[in-house]
Amino acid sequence: MPTLFFSYDQPYHDARVALKKRPDPRDLKRTFELEAERDRFDQSKVFAERELRAVCSAAELGEKQKKKYLAADKEWRKRHRVAIQLREKYEEEFVKKSIVQLQERDERLDRRNLRRQSLLGTYGNRAFLSQTNLGTAKYKPMG
């Protein structure tokens, strides 16, 4: 069957076929919009995952910090309690020792005052006794 297609019509023919095969611009627009929507969804998914990861890690960090704080607080309370117990113990010991020292000092002062009184009784009420160490010196009997 004879054809009307001649070889010198080839470029024209190719152009016509290309025109017919050219995609519809409405379809192109629709595919671009779908791709853009899909990309946006993927990006929002990635963003949401990152945000969730950040929130989770912040929560974990908060829990860790809280645990550390509570452990440190517990440790401090324990040390504080021990320090108070030690202080009370040493305060008791110190008070007992100081009471003993004060009693000894009072006894010495009483002995000293008795000696002074006896010397005053012996020598009469002379003024020089209060200005000398006669009343405060240890009594050593002669002989």
Image: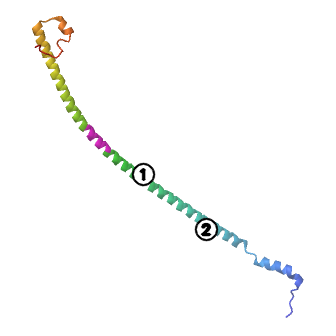
- Given this view, does label 1 or label 2 mark the residue nearer the observer? 1
Q: Does the residue at mark 1 contact the one at mark 2 (Cβ under 8 Å)?
A: no
* Residue 24 x, y percent position in the rendering: 73, 74
Image: 11 above or below 102: below
> Helix, strand, or loop for circle 1?
helix
Q: Quadrant of the C terminus?
A: top left
Task: Please give the range of residues in magenta.
Answer: 79-88
Determine the residue positioned at 16% across, 21% down. Answer: 108
Name the residue located 44 percent from the left edge and 53 percent from the top edge: 62
Pick the quarter of the image with the N terminus: bottom right
Q: Secondary structure at mark 2?
A: helix
Q: CA distance from mark 1 to mark 2?
A: 40 Å
- Look at the magenta stretch and give its main secondary structure: helix
Identify the residue under disc 1.
65
The foreground one among 104 and 92 is 104
In the picture of the structure, the residue carrying the numbered disc 2 is 38
